[in-house]
């Protein structure tokens, strides 16, 4: 298999291998199921080091374009890994789970977050939960807005995003005590001066104060700001949350058949929020950024993307940040930077008033509407009455041509928190959510099956199968 490698090119050899094989798959020269030459043969025929070929094939495997066969090399996958994986991002983090799934499952296996014994206090009736997450590449959109406008206040929302991605995961195990948050900010100091750091700290403190007003006992535990210009051209904002709770209070997410699935909307304006929410959250922003924003940003801010990505996937959209989202009151920038909603006030009240009825809580973050597949056993999840697709997601799909099946794997698509309860408890959940100005409705149900799988019908009547 001749790859036509140009050793004088500025493009790394491993990337040329990736591009050549990806092109052959897209054009049909390499068919699904076709076996690739061995690593040794590819290296020999093209006079390339074997480790360079192996590196390229691993990246193609990560993108879902090829798959490794036991001791028999690689074959072309049955379908493309999607635009999301093509940008170096995984919807389900399967390669990570291959590593961590064999590790100690903790004190309560199956819970939404890993739960350990109470190593901090030594109480056998309690447990510890430590959770790390962040705003992801949403911080790059804030960086673009900051560079265009000069206003660092845009980073207040990024501080909220980072905290919520930890807090709302903790909600899914029933956290009910004190929570300590530590922030880690990695920045390129040449591009993100002190006023950006100040805005992030102010945003964190303001948001945590608002949560405390709603009864969420969350506090700052300090953090770290690192100047790492070699690692990032802009800024990365992460957080870590720690809490202690009684084991008897843990929501074990033992999701079983014959439960109703109640979705809590990601759009609108809760009565504890200061502005309307587009619903975007903090997942899928790599695709959202590149699929909506134009090549103006690639040319002006090359520090905001990975040059190894296929050029066709870099800032390939029709919009600038100030353009309007079709069918929406938001501009593109406002929609993409809409701070991630926390459902903490709603979940806290649900846990106080109907703790026995709450059988499961799922934060539809990584994996989006397919996140449920990781919980329960032998369950068929049926989602048949979803919220109308919010305009920001319709705009992403329209601009990119991404298949709707992938959209539901990447984005929350209208609800970002699911509550699993017996059928008679559905109205109680809806009523409590309404007290906080959040729309809620039964979006589906669970039934017995031989294995976990999901059948999802969108608001246009199209049905997709996952699992």
Image (cartoon, rainbow, N blue to C red):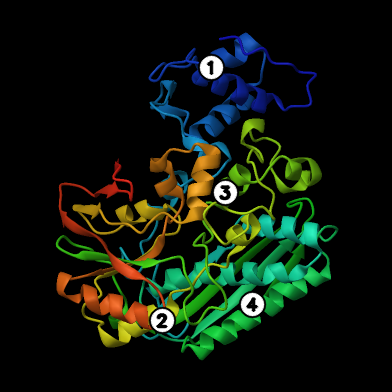
Q: Is residue 342 above or below residue 58?
A: below
Return the mark for residue 204: 4
| Vertical order, 382 against 17 (above or below) | below
In the shown orientation, is residue 450 left or right of residue 269? left
User: How far is disc 2 from disc 1 in space, using C-alphas?
Assistant: 53 Å
Nearer the N terminus, badge 3 or badge 4? 4
Label 3 vs label 4: CA separation? 24 Å
Q: Are marks 4 and 1 in contact (CB under 8 Å)?
A: no
Earlier-in-chain disc, 2 versus 4: 4
Q: Which x, y percent locates residue 159? A: 63, 71
Instruction: Indicate the secondary structure of the residue bearing disc 1.
Output: helix
- Which mark is first along the chain, 3 or 2? 3
Q: Which residue, given by chain and number where applicable, does mark 3 sit on? A: 288
The number of callouts visible is 4
Circle 2: element type: loop
For the point 43% across and 38% down, which residue is it? 403
Query: Residue 356, image x and y in percent?
Result: 21, 80
Quarter of the picture holding the N terminus: top right
* Residue 34 vertical position relative to residue 58 in the rendered view, above or below: above
Q: Residue at x 38, y 41 (%)?
A: 405
Most foreground residue, 109 or 60 = 60
Q: What residue is pinned by disc 2?
A: 436
Distance, label 2 to label 3, CA atoms, is: 28 Å
Alpha carbon separation for disc pair 2 and 4: 22 Å
Residue 84 in view (yes/no):
no
Q: Which dot, 1 or 3, sits closer to the camera?
A: 3
Residue that label 1 marks: 24
């Amino acid at each position: 298999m001749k790859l036509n490698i140009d050793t004088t090119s500025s493009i790394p050899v491993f990337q040329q291998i990736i591009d050549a094989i990806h092109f052959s798959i897209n054009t049909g020269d390499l068919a699904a199921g076709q076996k690739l030459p061995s690593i040794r043969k590819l290296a020999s025929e093209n006079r390339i080091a074997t480790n360079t070929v192996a590196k390229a094939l691993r990246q193609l495997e990560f993108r879902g374009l090829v798959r490794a066969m036991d001791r028999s090399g690689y074959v072309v996958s049955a379908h493309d890994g999607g635009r999301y994986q093509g940008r170096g991002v995984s919807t389900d983090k399967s390669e990570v789970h291959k590593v961590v799934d064999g590790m100690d499952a903790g004190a309560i296996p199956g819970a939404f977050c890993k739960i350990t014994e109470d190593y901090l206090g030594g109480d056998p009736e309690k447990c510890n939960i430590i959770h790390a997450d962040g705003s992801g590449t949403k911080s790059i959109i804030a960086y673009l807005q900051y560079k265009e406008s000069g206003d660092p206040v845009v980073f207040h929302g990024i501080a909220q995003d980072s905290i919520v991605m930890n807090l709302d995961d903790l909600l899914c195990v029933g956290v009910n005590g004190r929570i300590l948050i530590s922030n880690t900010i990695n920045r390129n100091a040449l591009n993100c001066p002190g006023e950006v750091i100040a805005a992030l700290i102010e945003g964190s403190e303001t948001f945590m104060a608002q949560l405390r007003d709603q009864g969420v006992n969350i506090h700052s535990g300090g953090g770290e700001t690192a100047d790492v210009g070699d690692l990032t051209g802009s800024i990365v904002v992460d957080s870590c949350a720690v809490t202690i709770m009684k084991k008897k209070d843990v929501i074990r997410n033992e999701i079983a058949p014959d439960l109703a699935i109640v979705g809590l909307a990601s759009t609108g304006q809760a009565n504890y929020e200061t502005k309307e929410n587009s619903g975007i959250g903090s997942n899928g922003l790599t695709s959202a950024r590149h699929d909506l924003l134009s090549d103006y940003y690639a040319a002006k801010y090359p520090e905001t993307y990975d040059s190894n990505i296929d050029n066709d996937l870099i800032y390939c959209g029709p919009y600038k940040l100030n353009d309007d989202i079709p069918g929406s009151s938001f501009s593109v920038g406002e929609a993409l930077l809409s701070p991630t909603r926390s459902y903490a006030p709603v979940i806290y009240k649900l846990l106080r008033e109907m703790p026995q009825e709450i059988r499961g809580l799922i934060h539809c973050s990584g994996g989006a509407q397919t996140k449920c597949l990781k919980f329960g056993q032998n369950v068929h999840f049926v989602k048949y009455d979803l919220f109308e697709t919010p305009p920001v997601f319709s705009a992403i799909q329209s601009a990119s041509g991404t298949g709707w099946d992938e959209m539901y794997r990447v984005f929350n698509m209208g609800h970002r928190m699911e509550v699993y309860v017996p059928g008679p408890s559905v109205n109680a959940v809806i009523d409590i959510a309404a007290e906080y100005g959040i729309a809620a409705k039964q979006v589906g149900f669970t039934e017995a099956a031989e294995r976990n799988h999901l059948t999802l019908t969108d608001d246009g009547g199209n049905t997709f199968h996952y699992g």
